[in-house]
Amino acid sequence: MTVERPTWMLAEFTAGLDYDRLPGDVRRQLGDFFLDYLRVASMGARAPWSGWARDFVATHGGTGEAYVLFSPERIDPVSAAFLNCTFAGGIDSDDTHVGAMGHAGCIAFSAALAVGQQIGAPGKDVITAVAAGYEAMIRIALSVQPSHFARGFQSTATCGGFAAATAAAHLLFKGEDRPRRIAETLGLAASRSAGLAQFYRSGSTVKRIHAAWAAEAGVGAALLARSGFSGPTDILEGSEGFARAYADEVDFTPLADGLGSTYRLCEVMVKAHSCSARVQAAAEGALSLCQDLGIGPADIARVLIGIPAVIEGRLTHPDPVDVQAAQMSLPFTVALACARAAEAGPGFSLTVEDYQGGLADAAITELSGRVSCEVEEEMNALTTADSVPARLTLTLASGEEHSIYVAAPKGSATRPFTHADHVARFEAELRRRIPAENCARLIAWAEDFASVEDVNEIGHALGGGPNA
């Protein structure tokens, strides 16, 4: 399929998108994603790198009307997008599109809320901008994957700027020239696309701010466009544009296919655990097997995991060098799940703190070294844009073998969390921060964004209200 002018096609779609055009199931999905965004951001705000980001913004940020999440403080929208996205995108618990290999939600929500609060936008406009951001990032990333990933780029950082730019531009620009202004904003954002995947190999904390950099770049691009700057309106397909620079193989069919009628955001996975989306199924399988058998690491001689080829390499290192690398390691995650299975009740989730503790636990690190990963053609065939399956076989010290197959993990599009699940997970975390009545208001707004007259109400309920 030949796609003519994909940048302009995307700009026209997002320019014409409004709340009334969003199908009811998409609105409901976005409401659940909003609750999950706040849940994850609340957890992430306690992480040490969130403190580093606060210090950075305090030194380099400006004044404005955008709220810092969980605080009465207001700052400029570029800094707010960066800081809030560090909270939401830094702990690897945020929602993910598996095929796009990136995290759109933390970026789109952070950007849309920051700009929406700066201009006093109503909730229905902000959630529509979020939808536009999800669609833009996912569809662009699908057009360059997996070649983009194979070349060493992490699409949350490189393609995430398109999510933020689209969401911000959707809010800032109105009128007949709206498509052109959005396209120019995409062109500006593309020149700031960056995000290398060396952290998979060498460790570091840079991935903690990959999403935040994208949110910052996209919001900044929209504000620059409003000030008069412009980017190329053929930036995706141009002979020296994004696709040619960032991928060896490009196909814009996923960008155009179903645009305006099918929402790729409905394929997004909400994570059960703070680790790579592609290892969630294996973690679930390990927890289930070890619980059923009543065993732990000392009982296991070795583990064999059947995987698709997309996992091999960056996600199969058994000896991670730091916490970030551990969260990206399939062998370590499975070993950690085996160790935690005995205490894993309903709603259990592997957290960053679990990974930190696991790296200091000899039983877990030793078991990680006894985990083997083998590419299976069947796993390749069963991998979808929604989720990655896993087949685990545990060989016990006694010689017994026990196997489990997980086609798709909990939270994926084919096994989604229910609205009640999202509410329960949200309340379990947010009631640690804000009063029950504030939680109830946020849940009600998530169920009907049209009832939010001004998204500053959301910032107020999260941290600016007298009882928050």
Image (cartoon, rainbow, N blue to C red):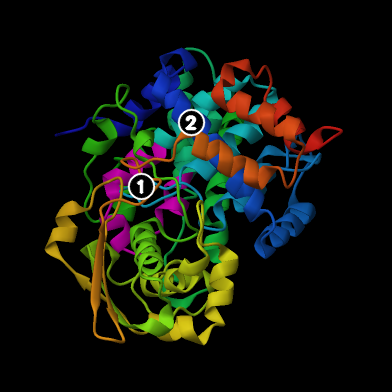
Q: Is residue 152 rendered magenta in the image? A: yes
* Residue at image coords 38%, 69%: 290
Q: Name the chief secondary structure element in magenta.
A: helix
Distance from Cα at disc 1 to Cα at disc 2: 28 Å
Mark nearer the N terminus (1 vs 2): 2
Q: Nearer the viewer, mark 1 or mark 2?
A: 2
Q: Which amino acid does label 1 sit on?
A: Phe
Residue 412, picture quadrant: top left
Residue 30: assigned label: 2
For the question of whether residue 227 can be seen, the reply is yes
Percent of width and height locating residue 425: 57, 44
Q: Which quadrant of the rendered structure holds the C terminus?
A: top right
Residue in view at x 38 percent, y 58 percent: 280
Is any part of residue 231 visible from this angle? no
Task: In the rendered view, tell whether residue 124 sits above or below residue 281.
Answer: above
Amino acid at the residue labelled 2: Leu
Magenta segment range?
Answer: 136-160
Q: Which of 376 and 199 is in front in this view?
A: 376
Residue density around tag 2, few if under 14, some if 14–19, many if 20 or more, within 10 Å: many
Residue 441 magenta-highlighted: no
Which residue is under mark 1?
Answer: 242
In the displayed structure, does residue 76 sit left or right of residue 178? right
Left/right placement of residue 411 relative to residue 397 reads right
Residue 208 position, x and y percent, is 56, 60
Q: Position of residue 68 (x, y in %)?
A: 73, 42
Secondary structure of residue under mark 2: helix
